[in-house]
Image: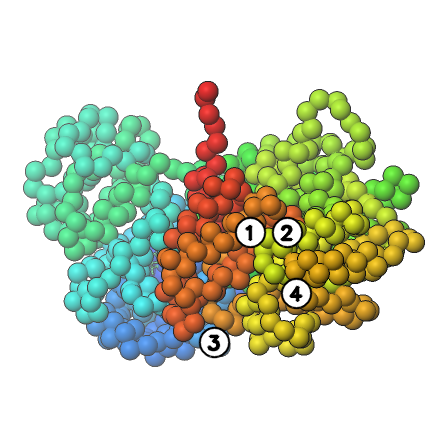
Amino acid sequence: MTDPADQTLAVRGRVARPNAVAYKEAGALLRAGGLVAVPTETVYGLGADATNDEAVAAIFEAKGRPRFNPLIVHVRDAETAARFVVFDDRAKTLAKRFWPGPLSLVLRRTADCSISLLCSAGLETLAVRVPDHPVAQALLRTAGCPIAAPSANPAGAISPTRAEHVAESLGDKVDLILDGGPCPVGIESTVLDISGETPVLLRPGGVPIEALIKVIGPIDVASAETPNASPGMLASHYAPRLPLRLDAHSVRADEALLAFGPAALAGAAVTENLSRRGDVKEAAAKLFAALRRLDQPDLTGIAAMPIPETGLGAAINDRLRRASAPRDPQEETSSEGDLLSQIGAVVGDKGLITDPDAMAPHLLELRGRFQGQAPCVVRPASTAEVAEVVRLCAEAGTPVVPQGGNTGLVAGGIPFEDGQAIVLNLGRMNKIRGIDPANDTITVEAGCILHDVQQAAEAADRLFPVSLGAEGSCQIGGNISTNAGGIQVLRYGNMREQILGLEVVLPDGRVWEGLRALRKDNTGYDLKQLFIGAEGTLGVITAAVLKLYPRPRARASAFAAVRDLDAAVALLGRIRAAVGDAVTSFELFPRLGIDLALAGVPDTQDPLADRYDWYVLVELTGGGGSDLGEPLETALMAALEDGLVPDATIAANQAQTDAFWRLRENMVEAQKNAGGSIKHDIAVPVSAVPAFIARASAAIAALIPGIRPVPFGHLGDGNIHFNLTQPEGADKAAYLARWEEVNRVVHDIVAEFSGSISAEHGIGRMKVDENRHYSRRWRSS
Ligand code: TXA
Ligand code: MG
């Protein structure tokens, strides 16, 4: 004898009357990872065992649903829900009043939640609901597992309210359809997010918002601007094939009419009246079936008469608005599904990440301030693969966000929250293609880690001079795309100055072959310069030829207190006059920075005995045979005598040099212990640094009394990290809320000095508006 479940696997899409045999079979199918369509009071759901990753993945596959769109999980009762989500008092109150029924609650997952992460689509929340339909309830009991179920229709299309609707559109993709007749409510559940402080209505539905407000008070309504609020509420959705026209007060003979109320318009080719007596509840129940019947290929469109916004009317109008929205090709999930499979065919399993856990680190900005969404993270292994992926995305109209080590401070490598763009991560392209010591060049792929490039240069007895805090994980492609700076710009220049050639995949997928290794090349425009610092907006850098330098053979460093900022600038001039280009770094510290480091960072010492307002760290490097200690000492002694430098110490060994640099590298860490810090990455001419710091410090002190400036950084090249620690004892959140206001005051002063509001971190997503505000430099006369 064959097991009934085996038989149904062979015949897909069979419609069964719900009786004991059918429940048993449906339960067995679900437990075995199959898909069962089940009626609920709202619409038919496409159900799978919510704890089974593969079964849940099959739902996305069958519907052609984007992976970033989370699923509602159906459970028997509130007690079961509480095993999967943090079920607080507010949830209990709502459950008591509205469950079983058409309300889905979005809540935080419990720590040991066994529901597949795919249901949450990368969010920390999960939507749960207890359906009221007897067939859904019976199935939940026989299956014994929570059931993930979106509406049982292809993504973007009209939702199903009868078993036939499911059979017509998804018949070949489901194992069994339980026929429970027409759905009594007829419109999907209301989705309410109560994971945060204020409840947010994500989707109007079967429970009117008025009823919810009566029970829990004020509710925010999610809009397109609410980030992340409702990943699945695509503008175009529930759509018939015919265009839908809203608020119709007349109808043409080649149109279908969706009527409402006693006075249906006359003259339509075909009419469906949702409710002659003007009852929104009746209208909701009929809505989707009526749309299906009106969607006839020989007509030109569907005209919909106005429907009041009250009660279920809000949900009906929401569906009609989405059904009438222009159809964005991206939102037609079949094309999304196609694109992912096409990309998968190019880059293989290793190169395509869609698992939310594995994608998570690529979607989150270093400091946690930006959390993007994407259908996938693509990790190509070659330039040809990058080119093909970019070409496919260009054809599909899908945006691409190139990403390196994801160490950026302005979120340039993080996609938007709308989940439209794919992330193109270059990390697998990490080959050093060649090194030419005689030409002093190295050719590297974009995904090479900066530190690995430094090491490869060193192995060939050369120096690659770009050096910065993130060098252990940042990648060359990102360094080039942001025109990175760092601690040796004074001597060697920034990233732009290290580049002789580039290989770039252009936005249409063509490869620009600019991988030359020439120090002289005057053949027309220098196109590579366009891609440097372009932050991926003009193309994807896949490889570069970088300059190498002789390795320094001699080194000397000193830590000096300076009388004031003018003295610091004068000291730089004097030392450069003495030793020329040997000055590699000239870094500024304020006393508060030192104090915070001593208090909060282990293993830090004050290099000098007394306290002074300002300090500099000077580092000299030079070729073989040069003695740098002596000229440094001479210059410092002279400065001491002239009163520029009250005290200084020269490192006697590498350990002391390292101790100076530890202080410098911990400046940011040190500030963390003192509360909120509002940051600026500015540059002004070196000569203007003292005046800038004085003016900007006075201006922000007037704005926020007690604010504590910690300006530090690359005085030698005019790039100051003008970071502002909150007043002692102030409220951190309230302080940080003034970020933009403070930026404006500081950046206005930067602008007066013709400075830069982004010296070495880039624009990214963070400074787009700020950049626009300050970049109007055109004049017509
Ligand atoms: O009435 C209904 O809710 C039906 C029946 C079958 O239960 N289901 C349904 O599911 O309409 P679906 O997948 O078509 O719509 C669920 C909506 C989507 O817009 C989705 O983005 C949102 O709920 N959603 C699900 N989980 C969420 C979460 N954790 N956070 C925010 N939105 C979520
Ligand atoms: Mg749906």
Residue 749 lies, with reference to residue 556, above or below; the image says: above
**Label drawn at residue 690:** 1
Could you tell which of marks 2 and 4 lies nearer the N-terminus?
2
Left or right: residue 751 compared with residue 151: right
Q: Which residue is mark 4?
A: 646
Residue type, numbered disc 2:
Val
Nearest to viewer (mark 3 / mark 2) = 2
Decide which of 21, 668 is in the foreground and name it: 668
Query: Residue shown at 11%/37% (left/top)?
Result: 264
Q: Separation of disc 2 and disc 1 at Cα?
A: 8 Å
Q: Is residue 582 above or below residue 366?
A: above
Q: Quadrant of residue 72?
A: bottom left
Residue annotated with mark 2 = 569
Q: Is residue 374 left or right of residue 469?
A: left
Query: Does 552 sit left or right of 98 as displayed?
Result: right
Disc 3/disc 2 C-alpha distance (Å)? 55 Å
Comparing 527 with 743, the one in front is 743
Residues under labels 1 and 3: Cα distance? 52 Å
Asked if the residue at tag 1 contacts the one at tag 2, i.e. Cβ–Cβ closer than 8 Å, the answer is: yes
Expressed as whole percent of the image width and height from the top left, the position of residue 109 reads 43, 71
Residue flagged by tag 4: what amino acid is it?
Pro
Q: CA distance from mark 2 to mark 4?
A: 15 Å
Do we see residue 350 in this rendering? no
Looking at the image, is mark 1 or mark 3 nearer the viewer?
Answer: 1
Which residue carries the number 3 mark? Answer: 111
Q: State the SS at label 4.
A: loop
Q: How is the image coloured?
A: rainbow
Q: CA distance from mark 4 to mark 3?
A: 57 Å
Residue located at (43% from left, 40% from top)? 773
Label 2 CA crowd tier, 10 Å (few <14, some 14–19, many 20+): many
Of helix, strand and loop, which one carries label 1?
Answer: helix
Which secondary structure, mark 3?
Answer: loop
